[in-house]
Image (spheres, helix red, strand yellow):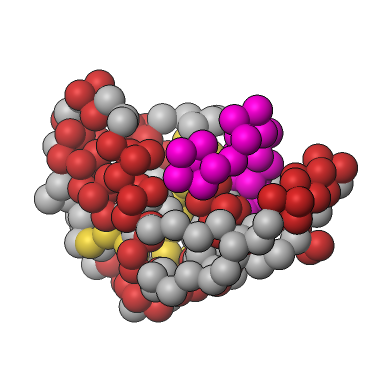
Amino acid sequence: MVEKLRIDKSKILELSNSLYKNYGTTMAGLRAIGYDFDYDDYHNFVHGRLPYENIKPDSILRSLLLSLPLRKIIFTNADKLHAARALERLGLEDCFEGIICFESLNSTNRDNINDNDEIFDIIRYLSDHENPVSGLPKTPIVCKPSETAILKALEIANIDPQRTLFFDDSVRNIQAGKRIGLNTVLVGTSQRVKFADYAVENIHNLKEALPELWDSEAKPENVRYSGKISVETPVIA
């Protein structure tokens, strides 16, 4: 951000946090306020420095996914290379039908750059308003928690939201998914929040939380979870 976008180093932490909070990703926020950059360069820089070697194979999750008799699709804000690397390190690269990622939802067309004075006016606006989204410039990047992003992902995957389980560790993403009719599972906590049909502290506990998904006698269209809503396709985010 300092070298490529010439952003004042002292402003980066405040800017990144504010943009992530209001746009879902810092990248989406940077585009909203007018910064122009190559998406692949951005992803390569951000993800290229991640310690992938720290990700260990997850044999328990692999067994769960392979035994689950339903379609499974990754839906991520990240680029396809990062998603593929993470899945490979986890040993899950063959557990999903496909990956819906940044490239699936976004074109390479980019707009003009705002000047620094306008950008810092936006930073101050973000800081001064508890829920400023309605007054912010729109981002050309499509990503969660945008309902548009989720609807587009469902269209690409050709699935019915009312027959889909949506797993995510973000409350905002879960809320957006619920608003468009998805059945939702919040991962990472046992406390079920508003808009979450289920809360699973650890994804390894999925079979205990939703044993009906593993009903060997049931075809996918007949599988049901508590609430009497049929489940066709889990979307793992």
Say which quarter of the image contains residue 181.
bottom right
Visible residue check, residue 30: yes
Give the quarter of the image for residue 17. top right
Majority secondary structure of the magenta segment? helix
Which residue is at a point 23% across and 62% down the rendered structure image?
Answer: 98
Residue bounds of the magenta highlight: 1-23
Most distant residue in the top direction: 54
Q: Position of residue 77 (x, y in %)?
A: 42, 53
**In the image, is 133 to the left or to the right of 53?**
right
Task: Verify whether residue 151 appears in magenta.
Answer: no
Q: Residue furthest right?
A: 128
Q: Is residue 195 visible?
A: no
Give the camera-side residue of 199 and 12: 12
Name the residue: 24% across, 29% down.
Answer: 52
Horizontally, is 175 left or right of 126 in the view? left
The answer to which of 131 and 205 lies nearer the viewer is 131
Residue 37 position, x and y percent, is 44, 57
Residue at the location (60% across, 53% down)? 29
Q: Is residue 21 magenta?
A: yes
- Which of these two is toward me, 5 or 16? 5
Pinpoint residue 62: horizontal percent, then vertical percent. 18, 38
Residue 81 falls left or right of residue 134? left
Image spot of residue 144 (x, y percent): 52, 57
Q: Residue at x 76, y 51 (%)?
A: 117
Taking the image as shown, residue 17 lies to the left or right of residue 52, namely right
Where residue 205 sits, quadrant-wise, is top left
